[in-house]
Image (cartoon, grey):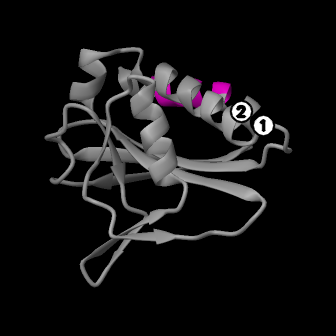
Amino acid sequence: MKIKQNDFDSQEFNNFLDLRIIPDSTENDQNIYSSDTISFHKYANNQKIHLNYITKPNLLLEQRSAEWFGPTILVTTAALIQNPELISITLSVLANYLTDYFKGRKEPKIKISFITQKSKTQFTKLDYEGDKEGLKEFEKLLNQFKN
């Protein structure tokens, strides 16, 4: 399991009251998301997690690998105030999604990122790389940002 932390300032993320998926990159005004983002988005919303895109996907990045590339998910303070269990629920839905998606096959290494809000303009991006079992440790780290 590997977790990388990156702190940054931003004015654009603090207005959201729900979970948001952020593009992996933007090029020529095109928002590029990993190819599995759309199916995870649909699955999460069917599980009653209100997960929206910060901007509409224009292109999907097809990543062929033995790894699963998940979305970057923004978790604002406002979203956590409305639902303090949001991180736990989201990671549980992710684990269920991966179990269903890879049923009958070996589950791959997971790559997913969460951006959490520290203050009005300060954010931390946590990149997770590991197996599904490591998500419990990742959840503990994410929950430290709730305070």
Q: Are marks 1 and 2 in contact (CB under 8 Å)?
A: yes
Q: Taken as a whole, is the magenta stretch helix, strand or loop?
A: helix
Which image quarter: residue 14? Answer: top left
Rate crowding at label 1 as few (under 14), some (14 to 19) or many (20 or more) other CA atoms within 10 Å.
few
> Which residue is pictured at 58% across the width and 70% down the height?
62
48 vs 118, nearest the viewer? 48
Residue 113 in the figure: left or right of residue 50:
right
Residue 41 shows which numbered tag?
none
Q: In the displayed structure, would residue 29 be above or below residue 120?
A: below
> Which residue is pictured at 38% across the width and 26% down the height?
49
In the rendered image, residue 134 lying in the magenta stretch gets the answer no
Q: x, y (%) of residue 35?
A: 53, 61
55 vs 129, nearest the viewer? 55
**Quarter occupied by the N terminus:** top right
Residue ID for mark 1: 103
> Which residue is pictured at 42% across the width and 15% down the height?
85
Residue 99 shows which numbered tag?
2
Which residue range is magenta in the image? 136-143
**Quarter occupied by the C terminus:** top left
Separation of disc 1 and disc 2 at Cα?
6 Å
